[in-house]
Amino acid sequence: MTRLLAVFLVFLATHATAHEGMWIPSTLSKLVMNDMQNAGLKLSADEIYAINQSSLKDAIVLFGGGCTASVISDQGLILTNHHCGYSQIQSHASLENDYLKNGFWAENFDAELTNPGLSATFVVRIEDVTEEMQKTAAAAGTENAEEALRKKALELEREAVDGTGYKAEIKPFFYGNAFYMIVTETYRDVRLVGAPPSSIGKFGGDTDNWVWPRHTGDFSLFRIYASPDNQPADYSEDNVPLSPKRHLKVNTDGVEEGDFTMIFGFPGRTFQYITSPAVEYILETENPARIAMREASLGVIDRAMEASDKTRIQYASKQSRISNAYKKWIGQNMGLKEFDVIEKKKKTEEAFLKAAMSQKGMEGYSQIVGELASLYAENEKYQNARNYLIEFYYYGPEILRFAAGFRDLVENYDTLAASGKFPEEVDKLFNLADGYFKDYNSEVDRDILAAQLPLFHQNCPDVLTSETLNSLIKNDNYGAASDAFYDKTVFADREALEKALKSKEKKMIKTLKADPAYCVATELLDAYGENVAPAYRSFSNEEEGLMSVYMKGLMELLPEKVNSPDANSTLRLSYGKMEGVKPRDGIAYTPYTTLSGIMAKYIPGDKEFDVPAKLMELHEKADYGPYGKDGELRVCFLGSHHTTGGNSGSPTINARGELVGLNFDRTYESTMSDIMFSEEICRNIMVDVNYILFITDKFAGAGHLVEEMDTVSNPVKKRPQPVHELKAK
Ligand code: GLU
């Protein structure tokens, strides 16, 4: 065993007694298992993760690209967040069938709605390939290590899935101090089954997002379909509901304060080991710039959505995409400051330096933090430019991305014309335009440009600029620049675009090439490609290399500062318990909220706090069916689990491996946990499973879905079983 690997295992053994950590389920150490079992867990490591028999991990699904879901019936029914299924729900919504406003519930399999592009991925197995990868790197030498690792990874991945329909991917952990191969199986036919109205699924809207007390029924139901022989398949009418290896039982007793719970899912990214200069950059430069850019676009979008139902539906998903991280960054900055994260990081770095200087053979580590600091200072310009590209091009006026989609057509005109394929390509692009214009409002987009332009123009480093854009800005009049841009472009209007595309080929190419949207988009992308990307890439590589050494040093010198590896969208398990928190002086968050709290927040007709009449009626009669407890209906609860984006939709699982809740958020004070987790302060927010069942059954009348689930109740407590009651109806 290499020295490093030994260290890696030691760190697991010394530091597994807190709720911090997103553990790799295939390598749950004895200490993690003991700690969980002491806290109440009734399962063995094999019942959580195994490859020769079904285990809990077989019920956990990567939903689309960035959320989690869990299988909750033997017919492939999966549970995720409303906000994870939001773009699918929105794509099926129209003024006639306003599923955002009214919800959607399929009465039977035939009524379930198909979602092109949506997938559900299971983890088949996770293999530790650290030794092979490290041997490869050592044999290749520093200069050639990267290429050698890439080749080795491809070879191992290919071998691992040969003759199967699986995919394999080797990912670095701890900045390349460990490597795991993740073998997965992806199902490509995932249909929408049920979603509550937004007044439940998004109750509280942006005001309550990242906030406690919380009352959001943030859930939706989908179903995985497979070929008749239960294999992954593209959508087909012949497909049938998946017969899964494993589904979670749904425990209707829920949880009580102090009960052991765990979250199983695919956390996206965390940055727990970054050094103080990196935190300083995020806090003082990156977050403020990105927050300001989003504030500008959200001001426009929010106003427009309020003024028109059509725009509300068109922009719902886009608005959420922008506002979610916007508010998170504000909370993150607040938390980083209040928790004094920079000072805490500096203390660790001092201790690191001291340990390096005082231990024989460790002096090599003493330069590393300083080298990282110089690297960040040198590259700030490129990082800033990259942030502005993301905020302006990818999250700003949509017209830029749309226009850039025509680039291949324009640039490959000669070849396409010679092969006779040009008209076909034009048709293809024009068909795509339909989808684009369905949710596009050129007035809104124009105002977004006008709102973001001053920030972009004045603050983005000049390595990223567009001559066309600069030529439109006269005397800092950004409104006039935006008008001039939109008045001249053909990409803001379906008819104008159609007319341009129907003109003679050469003329069309000339029109597109001169179009301001096309010019600005391609100039920005070119400037990024030429002036920013190479520098940023080499910066990232250098940073990765230095961080890898720093991480190794931390493991060797300060193992007590090392917890689980940063999240990287791979399957992880976090554990903790249901508990409230006192996040700051004078404030206490109780562990759960109830339906009465929804009524207390009710504002008739409000876009965030309106309450459906049926829900009010059920509340008035206290008609909670079997889902109430002690005369109240619980809605959300808090827990001390280490989670991040990507854990959205993750099941909350009790000590016996049964579903008791659905993770969807963190409290405002917890948003810093991507950089520093605090067991005293950080809490994740979950929907109580009884609220999910209540909304599905009593509110929406979709009791057949509850019946389909495998509900259980602790016999000692003798609570009525919802399934029995439904059957008796
Ligand atoms: N509301 C969060 C999100 O959508 C959920 C996951 C988290 O805690 O970050 O990103």
Image (tube, helix red, strand yellow):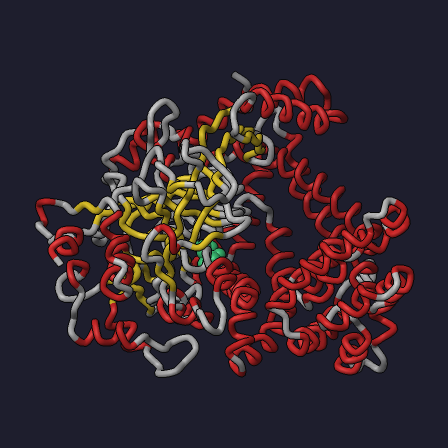
**Residue 63 horizontal side relative to residue 350, left or right:** left
**Residue 86 horizontal side relative to residue 594, left or right:** right
Q: Is residue 184 above or below residue 315?
A: above
- For this rendering, which residue is in front, 713 or 457? 713
Whole-percent x, y for residue 534 in the image = 79, 45
Q: Is residue 355 visible?
A: no
Q: Quadrant of residue 520?
A: bottom right
Residue at 33%, 62% in the rendered image: 582
Residue at 31%, 66% in the rendered image: 588
Q: Quadrant of residue 125?
A: top left
Whole-percent x, y for residue 5 in the image = 52, 23
**Residue 552 horizontal side relative to residue 219, left or right:** right
Q: Quadrant of the C terminus?
A: bottom left
Whole-percent x, y for residue 711 in the image = 21, 47
> What is the count of numbered marks?
0
Q: Quadrant of residue 550?
A: top right
Residue at 14%, 53% in the rendered image: 727
Whole-percent x, y for residue 623 in the image = 16, 68
**Residue 720 horizontal side relative to residue 567, left or right:** left
Q: Is residue 532 above or below residue 13?
A: below
- For this rendering, which residue is in front, 716 or 490? 490
- For this rendering, which residue is in front, 238 or 235? 238
- For this rendering, which residue is in front, 679 or 633? 633
Q: Is residue 419 above or below residue 400?
A: above
Q: Is residue 81 visible?
A: yes
Residue at 37%, 76% in the rendered image: 609
